[in-house]
Each structure stands twice: as C-alpha cells, then as structure tokens.
C-alpha cells in the first residue's frame, strides 16, 4: 500500500504558491460509531497529551515551509475535536498563528459532536478565532441515532445548536446521513425539514457506506434494516428537492450551502490547491506531491520524525486524473481554462472519448469554459469518475 | 532380492463411498512394514535418503508393504488404489486388472450400495478373487448378519465367515491380513516368458520423466532393457525400476512376473504411456498384448477461459502441465465472442471437470470462466456427414440437420423404499427410461434406468441426494447414442447473442431452461445506465425474457477530506471491477454470470 516514488522536490512546481489550507486531525472520541472507519477512538489522557505534544512539534517542523504563506482555511477535524479541553485547541491555534499568517477572513472550522461541548468551550473557541462550527447530527430520529451508535440524542444536538447561536456563531454546518438503518422516506423527510427549519448556513448529506472492519460490516445485511436501492434513491432525490426548496444550493455531491457559505476548506481539496495535514493519518498536497501521515495514533506519537503511510509525487497524467475526478464532484464542474493553464491543453485533448461518450449519454455537459455533470450525471457520477482514474 | 511369487499378494480394496476403504487401507499400512528383513540390511535406505533430498515424494496409486504372517513367513502386499468415481471407470478397470484379488468393504449398517455392486461386478469381470469384510461393526446400527445375508443373496459370494471389523477402532484387522494371505491367490505368470506388463497408472516427474506404474505378468524387466509400448510401438530404454514404498519410490534391480512396481525410461510425454497399454521387451516381444486396452474418450466438454484475457498463455501452459499427469484431459483452443481466447476441454465426467478446474485455479493461480458443460452430440447432416459436436456454437443450421443423437447411460440407483417415489419421478423428469426394479430386501430397491447423459451432468447427483435425504446411491456407465429431439438454446443480452451462454437442450425442456436462465442472469448482471433486456431464444424465436432495470444512483457521498488516495482507490476498484467483466455490445457481464447457468436447479 505504500507507494514511494518521491522525486526531487524541485520538480514539484507549485511549492511556492502563496495560499495554503491547514487540516488538523484530532482522533479522539467518547466511543466509536458503528459505521465509522476513520482513524479515531477513545484514548486516555496520557495519549492525548503526548499527541498534542507531537502535533505541536509537527507544526514546528513545517514552520519554514509555512512561514512565507498565507493560510486560507483551517479545519480541526476528527474524531471529536470538541471532546478535548479547549486549552488543546488554543495551543494548536496559537502555534499556527505564531509561525504563519492567517489570511483575513480565514475560515476556521471545528467539528463538534452534541454532548461534548459547553458554553466555556464555545467561548474559548471563538476567542482563538474559530468562526465555523460543524456539528455531526446525522439524523433527528433518536432510534436511528441509537442504531448508528451515536452517543447523543436530537435533544443534545438542539441544545448545542442553540448554545452556538447564543454565543454568536454565524456559520454552522450540520452533517446528515442517509441510507441508514430503520430509515424511511418519512423519517428522512422529518430529518431534512427539521434541520432546514433551524437554518444552518451549510448542510452536508453523506450516504452510509458499510466499511470493512466496522461493527456494521460484521452484522448481517438484512438485520441492519437498510433502505433498499429504490427507496434510497427516492430519499436521495427528496434530499435534493427539500434542501433546494429551503434555499440551499448544492455545490458538491454531498454539500449544500446558503449562497456565500460554501466551505472554503473543502473547495481546496476539489480544486487541487495546496493543503497540509497535521496529525495521525492526515493528508497533505503540496503541488504534485501528496503524502499521508502514518495511520495510527501510537505510530504517530512514537516518532518525532515524520512517518508517512504514503508519499508520492504525481506525474502529469495522475495530476490530470485527480483534477478531473475531484473537480467534477463540484456541481459547477471544472474550468477548462484552469485545466489548460495547468496542463497546457484542453481536457478534451486527453479525455476526449470519455467526455464525448458521457456527454452523449446525457451525464456530462460541456460549455465554453466548463465541464460539469448534469443532474442525472451526478446521480451516477462514480461510473463516469472511475473512467478518469 | 528375489521374492518367490507365492509370497506376493496383489490386491485392491473396493467399496461404496464412505464405507471405510481408506481407513482400512491406513490400518493395513500401519500393521505391516515397509521392508523385508533382508531388504533392511541392503542399501535401500541410502537410496531413500537420496530420494528425500531431491524432494521426490509422490502420492502413489499403489503401495508395497511387508506382512509377517502367523505362519512365520513374510509376504509382500501390493495394495493398488482404485479411483472411487464413475468418471474414472476405465482407470478403475485397469487397476483391477493389475490385481489378483479384492477386498470388498461393506458398511455393516448401510449394507450394499450402488457403487458396491458396480465395483464388485467389475472385479468379478476381471476374475478377481473377492472376499468381503464387514466394516463399522462398532456402530450402534450395525447389523453384520443382515448385511452378510444381503451380500450372499445379492452378489452371491460367501459372506457368513467374513471378518467383522471396525477399521476406525482397529478391531479385526489381523484377521483381514490373514485373509489376504489365505484368500487372495498368488500371482500367476512365468518369469521366463517374454515380458508382459500392464500399465495401470503413470505420473510425470520433472527429474525422471514419466514414471510408469505397472504390473508384471510375465518375464522380467531391469534397467538397460529396451521396452516397447504395444499400442504405439514406441520403444525406450529402461532407466530405473522399483517399487512403491510408503509415499516414495524405491529403486530395485529387477521386476519380475507377479510383481507390481514402476519403471522410468526418460519418457517426456505422458500420452505415450496410456493406462491399459501393454509393455513388452523390444528384443523379445510377447505375442499379444493384454486384453482390454482402449483409448478413453472425454464424455463431457466445456469451454475454459481465463478471467483475465491476458493470461491465455498461462492457461495453455497450465493445461499442458496438467496433461502431463492426466492423459484423459483433452483441450483445443477455441474463441468466443464473449469470452475471448480459451480452450474447449474434454473431461471424463463432471467430477473430472471439477478436479481440473479446481487445480487450475489453486495450483496455477488462474481465475477461470467456464461455460456450461455439455456432452458430445452426434449431428447427422442432410448431406450424410456426421459431426461430433462438442461446442454448441458449432451446431449447423437446422436446415442442414437430418437428426441428432445424444449419449445415454445406464444407471443403477439404490434407494430406500421411503424415497422410491420421488427418485422415480426425478428420473422421469430427466427423461429416464426404467429398465428394471428389484427389491434387494424389503426396504431397499435397485432401480435401473437409461438416462441421457446431458440430464445428469449438471446436478443430478445433488438432486438425488436431496430428494432421498442422502439414502440413495448412484452409479452409471456409458451405454449408447440414441436419436433425440434437441435444440440449441441461445441467450441474447441487450439484443446481442452471447455465444458462451448457448447450450443444447431437449426440445421440451427449452422453455423452462430458458426462463430459469434469464431469471438467473437478471440477478447476476449489474444495473447499467440503461435498461437491459435478457432473452432466451430457440431458432430465432424468443421464448423467455427478463429485464435488468437501469441504475439510478451510483455516487460516492462520503467525506474523505483530503485523503485523495482513498477516494482514488474506490474509483480504481470500480474500474478494476469493470475490467473483470466481459463486454458484450455495451453491456458489462460479470464472469460469475457465465457460471451461474450451471446452477439453474438450485432453490
């Protein structure tokens, strides 16, 4: 799984690009959810402290690299970052601001789970510049939450949401999940309508994917009581309809936002802009170089030097392919002139037959400057995206 | 190392499956020694060390052991294994021909079964002395007296004094060993006559070439002799002769009349050493070959294709290697529109097919796509030509066909009366013609049926088992070709004809088969961006149809953040999966779909 093809740094051309995004991975949870296969879990305080120490060291390590660059977004993800003592978050933010410059209006997000934060924490977050709050809700139906293995109820969420608003949070995202156990059209509708009524600025809707090694993957499929293929499609379609009815614009496959509240950080990923990830399992892209830290908390803490799970330098063909399969996830698609600026020629020169075929099938649409999915194309986007790999 | 002939016993063990043949064989080996006392003082052990260093251990079809009998004499036992399945009937008959006697093992709880009878008759045909052994007397349900009576009544051999044993518990084995000495005749034959040996098996060894397993009937053979294979007339010089130790070859000076052993002669092609052939001395040949040699012809054919089309050369290589040790496997290159380059392979039967495909997959690490197995049909054309059809795609246009013939087997089925009705109806469904019905005892019946081979090559055995709750046994032999109303059933996927899915079927079964096949394919073919009709047709007329609905949603709505590699892997997997499918028109068909048609009768 480890692919080591590092080339001399000098070939990785866009190192000197000015802006960069920062991701910090905080893999600590009260308990792991039944579907979760991210690097996370419950760890004791000793490990947490060692992790923070290592994290600050890692940020230092990249100090020289970051010092000349402007930070366009920071994302504190997990795990459950809000589980940690706010002093953790403060010291991370302090370290970042010590060695870099935040761009004005820099989007700084923290992921929170209901039941893990109070007024003190929120106040502390705001003090250190955090201006976007992303809450993992998944569903407003408590039986569905229980079967997902979530630690909270809808009531817990509502309490946190109100608390955030009361403390001046003006940019909130709510994560939802569809295709989950016991879900029906009506329960999904209830979740969507209830959440829209709260008017968060941003809503992400993900599909449950049964991943190997999770409790869900051990269970018999039929015992999970998942919606069937047709029902799931109906829910998926309804999601689009309800959210758009409430003024949320779908700007990526799973992401909806009120105009102007699109997540700056996520767009970094889809636009192949530079980002650096700190913490266990965190990924970075610096120009054509992509690397991922070791995917184990113990392994990460265990070495003061960076240990990579993957460290590759993409060749031009791979970069093009990523440009396509990441960029097309956005409803606006890719810009042909952006592509041409990066790779010298229009995408149709390299991907002509794929584009032509799926344009013909009504899944892609090409305009003067853009290539994007049609609505039907987004529904079946994997079929098309896999062609670009 | 001259062992007097009267101290040699060449025998086999015959039994219905699970009646305890291999357990008894194990016990016999345990109770006897590898070497005679004299041999132990010789250099044999050194040779064995050498063999071991070179890593040659071969699972042998025969083993030689030494038994010190109660009369104080040492006897050489050559125990020759017989393949236990009907597919290998000819091999069984050649193994029996190498023996002078047979131990008939009968489960003293279950009594005589179909294979018991088939094997006994085969042994008696070869003039073997057969003595029965009643096994599993330790079972609570054992009734050796009843079974002894049954053996006397049904087979007509004396069984009242047969050893009552439990091979599993090890009781009664000594008695069996003494019976072997006393009941199995010493080998006949004359050491001074010209050499006459029967080949009953052969294996390929990368160092020694083909190792030929044989029974010497007359004369003797030693290294340096020039030998001739009588069916082909080819001659070779003997390099080594020897016998079978436990799991290894032990060279010796000479093999003489009455002995069982092996020879090597730097032979590279197993097809030269056909089972059943006679070997003689080229300089001093015997007058005539041993009777019974025939070239075995495959009974069942199917297309075998590599799942990954690039591995066609590997598949050819693997088949060639397997053929080194299995002369009854045949293969010819063929091309399918749907599956690309592959081979039409011929097998002795369905078990043989299973064994070969499994070995290809396991030992050669090949992923295979096999087409539905079929039998060899005789197509009589209007112009008088007769084609032996092994691939349904080659069936001439119906206007050119006068009539067709299909192979029919004669089958013996032993069944408990409780399930007689359901077994008779199974045979009827499979177009069986009853030839006889005989009560073995009050509760068990021997049914004799003529059945078309193409009705039993799929799943007859499974159906038999499930409908009789396991209380039926079955054996068959090839009988004859008979005229039959046969049609070719074609499958169209998205209006495109898929050659690899065609098969020949009895006219009246076409509709049912076609419907089941469409239903099965509907499950196997993933949804596409468009709707896919699946149709079954006979002679251009559609007789069944199913539809695979269009895919509505295939989207990765998951947050992987900056972990692009993970996202990429998923897309790669999807692309990989697509590569593994076969493209017919613009429909991707998973390899599995081609196999699913074999399992139409599973509920």
Image: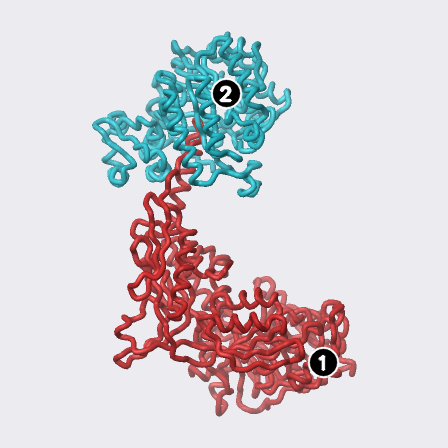
Chain colours: A cyan, B red
A252 sits to left or right of A209: left
Image coordinates of residue A38 in percent, x first then y, are: 52, 30
| Residue A251 lies in quadrant | top left
Q: In this view, does B245 lie to the left or right of B198?
A: right
| Letter of the chain that mark 1 sits on in the rendering | B
Give the residue drawn at x 53%, y 42%: A221
Residue underneath mark 2: A135
Q: Mark 2 lies on which chain?
A: A
Residue A338 vs residue A246, the one in the foreground:
A246
Q: Answer yes or no: is residue B190 visible.
A: yes
Q: Is mark 1 on a helix, strand or loop?
A: helix
Q: In this view, does A188 lie above or below B193?
A: above
Percent across and percent down for residue B96 are 58, 80
Marks 1 and 2 on same chain: no
Is A86 displayed left or right of B384 in the figure? right
Residue linked to disc 1: B148
Is residue A98 visible in the rendered image? The answer is no
| Image-quadrant location for residue B371 | bottom left
């Amino acid at each position: 799984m480890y692919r080591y093809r590092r080339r001399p740094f000098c070939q990785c051309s866009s190192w000197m690009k000015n802006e960069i995004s920062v991701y910090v991975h905080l893999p600590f949870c009260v308990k792991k959810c039944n579907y979760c296969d991210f690097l996370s879990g419950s760890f004791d305080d000793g490990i947490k402290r060692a992790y923070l120490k290592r994290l600050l060291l890692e940020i230092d390590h990249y100090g020289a690299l970051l010092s000349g660059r402007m930070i366009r977004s920071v994302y504190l993800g997990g795990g459950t970052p809000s589980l940690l003592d706010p002093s953790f978050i403060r010291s991370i933010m302090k370290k970042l601001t010590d060695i870099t410059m935040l761009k004005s209006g820099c989007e700084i997000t923290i992921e929170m789970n209901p039941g893990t934060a109070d007024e003190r924490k929120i106040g502390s977050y705001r003090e250190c510049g955090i201006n976007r709050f992303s809450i993992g809700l998944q569903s407003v139906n408590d039986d569905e939450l229980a079967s997902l293995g979530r630690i909270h109820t809808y009531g817990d969420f509502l309490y946190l949401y109100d608390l955030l608003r009361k403390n001046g949070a003006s940019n909130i995202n709510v994560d939802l999940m569809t295709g989950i156990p016991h879900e029906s059209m009506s329960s999904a509708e209830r979740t969507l309508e209830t959440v829209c009524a709260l008017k968060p600025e941003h809503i992400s809707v993900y599909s449950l994917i049964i991943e190997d090694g999770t409790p869900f993957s051990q269970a018999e499929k039929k015992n999970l009581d998942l919606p069937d293929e047709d029902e799931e499609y109906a829910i998926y379609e309804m999601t689009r309809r309800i959210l758009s009815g409430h003024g949320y614009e779908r700007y990526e496959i799973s992401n909806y936002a009120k105009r102007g509240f699109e997540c700056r950080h996520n767009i970094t990923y889809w636009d192949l802009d530079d980002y650096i990830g700190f913490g266990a399992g965190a990924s970075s892209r610096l120009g054509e170089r992509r690397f991922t830290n070791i995917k184990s908390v113990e392994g990460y803490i265990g070495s003061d030097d960076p240990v990579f799970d993957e460290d590759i330098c993409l060749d031009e063909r791979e970069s093009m392919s990523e440009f396509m399969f990441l960029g097309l996830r956005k409803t606006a698609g890719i810009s042909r002139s952006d592509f041409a600026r990066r790779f010298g020629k229009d995408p149709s020169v390299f991907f002509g037959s794929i584009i032509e075929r799926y344009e013909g099938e009504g899944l892609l649409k090409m305009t003067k400057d853009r290539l994007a999915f049609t609505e039907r194309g987004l529904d079946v986007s994997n079929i098309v995206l896999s062609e670009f790999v | 190392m001259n062992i007097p002939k009267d101290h040699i016993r060449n025998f086999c063990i015959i039994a219905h499956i699970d009646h305890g043949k291999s357990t008894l064989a194990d016990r016999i080996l345990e109770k006897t020694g590898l070497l005679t006392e004299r041999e132990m003082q010789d250099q044999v052990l050194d040779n064995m060390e050498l063999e071991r260093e070179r890593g040659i251990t071969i699972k042998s079809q025969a083993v030689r052991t030494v038994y010190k009998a109660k009369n104080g004499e040492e006897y050489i036992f050559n125990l020759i294994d017989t393949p236990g399945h009907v597919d290998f009937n000819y091999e069984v008959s050649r193994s029996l021909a190498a023996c002078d006697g047979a131990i008939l093992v009968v489960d003293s709880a279950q009594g005589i079964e179909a294979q018991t009878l088939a094997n006994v008759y085969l042994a008696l045909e070869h003039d073997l002395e057969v003595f029965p052994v009643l096994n599993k007397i330790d079972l609570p349900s054992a009734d050796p007296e009843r079974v002894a009576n049954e053996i006397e009544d049904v087979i007509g051999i004396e069984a009242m004094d047969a050893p009552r044993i439990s091979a599993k518990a090890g009781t009664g084995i000594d008695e069996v060993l003494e019976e072997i000495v006393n009941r199995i005749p010493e080998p006949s034959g004359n050491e001074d006559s010209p050499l006459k040996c029967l080949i009953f098996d052969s294996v390929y060894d990368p160092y020694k070439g083909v190792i030929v397993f044989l029974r010497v009937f007359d004369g003797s053979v030693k290294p340096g002799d020039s030998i001739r294979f009588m069916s082909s007339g080819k001659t070779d010089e003997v390099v080594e002769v020897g016998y079978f130790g436990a799991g290894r070859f032990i060279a010796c000076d000479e093999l003489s009349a009455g002995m069982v052993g092996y020879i090597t002669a730097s032979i590279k092609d197993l097809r030269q050493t056909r089972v059943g052939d006679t070997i003689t001395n080229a300089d001093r040949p015997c007058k005539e070959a041993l009777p019974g040699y025939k070239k075995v012809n495959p009974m069942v054919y199917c297309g075998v294709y590599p799942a990954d089309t690039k591995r066609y050369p590997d598949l050819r290589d693997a088949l060639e290697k397997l053929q080194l040790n299995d002369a009854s496997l045949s293969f010819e290159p063929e091309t399918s529109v749907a599956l690309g380059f592959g081979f039409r392979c011929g097998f002795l039967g369905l078990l043989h097919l299973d064994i070969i495909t499994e070995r290809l997959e396991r030992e050669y690490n090949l992923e295979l796509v096999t087409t539905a197995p079929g039998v060899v049909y005789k197509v009589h054309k209007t112009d008088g030509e007769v084609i032996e059809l092994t691939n349904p795609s080659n069936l001439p246009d119906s206007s050119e066909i006068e009539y067709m013939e299909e192979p029919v087997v004669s089958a013996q089925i032993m069944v408990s009366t409780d399930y007689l009705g359901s077994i008779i109806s199974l045979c009827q469904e499979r177009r069986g013609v009853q030839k006889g019905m005989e009560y073995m005892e009050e509760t068990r019946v021997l049914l004799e049926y003529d059945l078309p081979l193409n009705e039993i090559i799929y799943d007859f055995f499974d159906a038999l088992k499930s409908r009789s709750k396991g209380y039926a046994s079955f054996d068959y032999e090839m009988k004859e070709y008979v005229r039959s109303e046969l049609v070719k059933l074609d499958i169209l996927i998205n209006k495109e004809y898929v050659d690899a899915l065609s098969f020949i079927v009895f006219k009246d079964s076409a509709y049912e088969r076609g419907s089941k096949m469409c239903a099965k394919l509907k499950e196997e073919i993933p949804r596409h961006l468009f709707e896919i009709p699946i149709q079954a047709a006979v002679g251009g007329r559609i007789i069944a149809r199913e539809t695979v609905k269009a895919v509505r949603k295939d989207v990765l709505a998951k947050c992987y953040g900056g972990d692009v590699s993970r996202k990429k892997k998923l897309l790669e997997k999807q692309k990989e999966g697509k590569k593994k499918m076969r493209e017919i028109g613009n429909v991707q068909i998973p390899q599995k779909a081609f196999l699913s048609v074999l399992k139409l009768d599973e509920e």
